[in-house]
Image: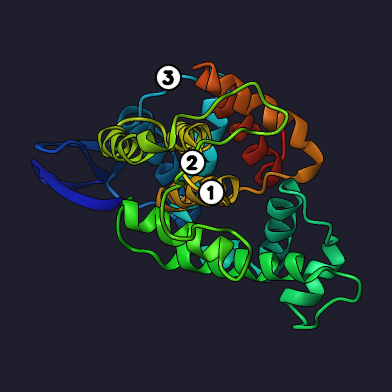
């Protein structure tokens, strides 16, 4: 967080707005904005704080794939979220959970409508005409969202397995809470996921990558990369897409960015961006994610 520092020079005292940022395990860099001989009023101070946050973010995180214009708008959003200290609760009302659950499950083929999802999650009424499996999966998605948002640890294999349990419990998914034991094909895709015996080691490697990248790679790009790699590996029998989208939002929230909804209406664009990631082009999904964040939380100037 930013703080005000007072220094004396000669006969006068001067004020600086200061933020310390850890740029490596052993190095901390101090950023300052000179305020003058008096602390400015709140609105002016907030603007200085926004400027300081954006400057610190720009140097802390390295961007590999986002265009400069998009990155600047994302950093504006990120700095604003930090300054106003938005909690997950303040940016995740019930309406968000309903829309997130509806869309993430619709991408996977659920036939429940948005209104039926609201009846189930908000009014606690089982909607008429909805299949038992769709109802269970909607309840599971809400439970999984709650679990991910209350997880205070890091990215671990047990965390990933628990998410998969939450999205597949009480369903016909044959293996819950562990990696798949057979090879799979993804309907409508040319991508062939790794063999089953490779999945555990690939997930371990991905977790190590995350630990190395989280201190420097821009959070939006990190979230996009983790999502792409999870979908590419397809480590579970079922629930891979829903788990990957939850992990994506977990990374955003840990970096004080608002969560994103990938709407089922743009499913084709979503799949195309994933396919680019399968080919090693992670820029496509990073841009896709950034554009959706900006669309949902900012007004284009």
The answer to whether marks 3 and 2 mark residues whose Cβ atoms lie closer than 8 Å is no
- Image: 79 above or below 4: above
Instruction: Tell me: 84 left or right of 292.
Output: left
Q: Position of residue 168 (x, y in %)?
A: 57, 62
Where residue 238 sits in the image (x, y, percent)?
57, 50
Image side of residue 240 versus residue 152, left or right:
right
Q: Dividing the picture into quarters, in which one does residue 201 lie? A: top left
Decide: marks 1, 2 in contact (CB < 8 A)?
yes
Q: Residue 189 versus residue 296: which sits nearer the camera?
A: 189
Residue that extends furthest to the right in the rendered view of this protein? 129
Q: Earlier in the sequence, mark 3 or mark 1?
A: 3
x and y percent of residue 282 in the render?
51, 22
Please give the name of the residue rendered at 47% of the width and 67% of the height, measured from the top-left corner: 147
Residue at 85 percent across and 76 percent down: it is: 127
**Residue occupying image coordinates x 55% and y 25%:** 192
Q: Residue 22 vs residue 71: left or right?
A: left
Observer able to see residue 66:
no
**Alpha carbons under labels 3 and 1: distance apart:** 32 Å
Badge 1 or badge 2: first in the primary sequence = 2
Mark 1 lies on a secondary structure that is loop
- Res 205 visible: yes
Circle 1 residue: 237
Front residue of this view, candidates 19 and 220: 220
Q: Residues within 10 Å of mark 3 (few under 14, many from 20)?
A: few
Residue at image mark 2: 182
**Quadrant that contains the C terminus:** top right
Mark 3 against mark 2, which lies toward the viewer?
2
Q: Secondary structure at mark 2?
A: loop
Q: What's the residue at 9%, 37% (across, down)?
A: 26
Q: Marks 3 and 2, how far apart in space?
A: 35 Å
Q: Which mark is residue 64?
A: 3
């Amino acid at each position: 967080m930013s703080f005000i520092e007072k220094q004396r020079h000669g006969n006068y005292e001067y004020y600086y707005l200061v933020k310390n940022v850890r740029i490596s395990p052993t190095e901390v860099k101090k950023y300052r904005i000179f305020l003058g001989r008096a602390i400015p009023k709140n609105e002016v101070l907030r603007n200085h704080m926004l400027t300081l946050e954006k400057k610190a973010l720009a140097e802390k995180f390295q961007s590999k794939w986002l265009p400069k214009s998009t990155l600047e708008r994302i950093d504006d959003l990120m700095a604003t979220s930090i300054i106003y200290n938005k909690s997950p609760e303040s940016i995740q009302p019930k309406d968000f959970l309903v829309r997130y659950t509806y869309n993430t499950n619709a991408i996977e083929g659920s036939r429940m409508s948005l209104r039926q999802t609201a009846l189930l999650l908000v009014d606690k009424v089982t909607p008429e005409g909805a299949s038992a499996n769709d109802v269970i999966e909607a309840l599971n998605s809400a439970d999984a969202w709650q679990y991910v948002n209350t997880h205070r640890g890091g990215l671990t294999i047990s965390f990933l397995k628990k998410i998969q349990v939450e999205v597949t419990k009480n369903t016909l998914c044959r293996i819950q809470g562990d990696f798949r034991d057979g090879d799979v094909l993804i309907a409508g895709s040319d991508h062939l996921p790794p063999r089953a015996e490779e999945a555990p080691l690939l997930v371990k490697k991905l977790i190590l990558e995350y630990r190395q990248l989280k201190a420097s790679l821009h959070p939006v790009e990190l979230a996009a990369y983790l999502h792409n790699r999870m979908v590419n590996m397809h480590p579970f029998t079922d629930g891979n897409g829903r788990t990957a989208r939850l992990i994506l939002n977990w990374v955003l929230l840990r970096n004080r960015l608002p969560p994103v909804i990938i709407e089922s209406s743009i499913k084709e664009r979503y799949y195309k961006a994933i396919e680019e990631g399968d080919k090693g082009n992670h820029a496509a999904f990073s841009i896709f994610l950034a554009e959706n964040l900006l669309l949902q939380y900012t007004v284009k100037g």
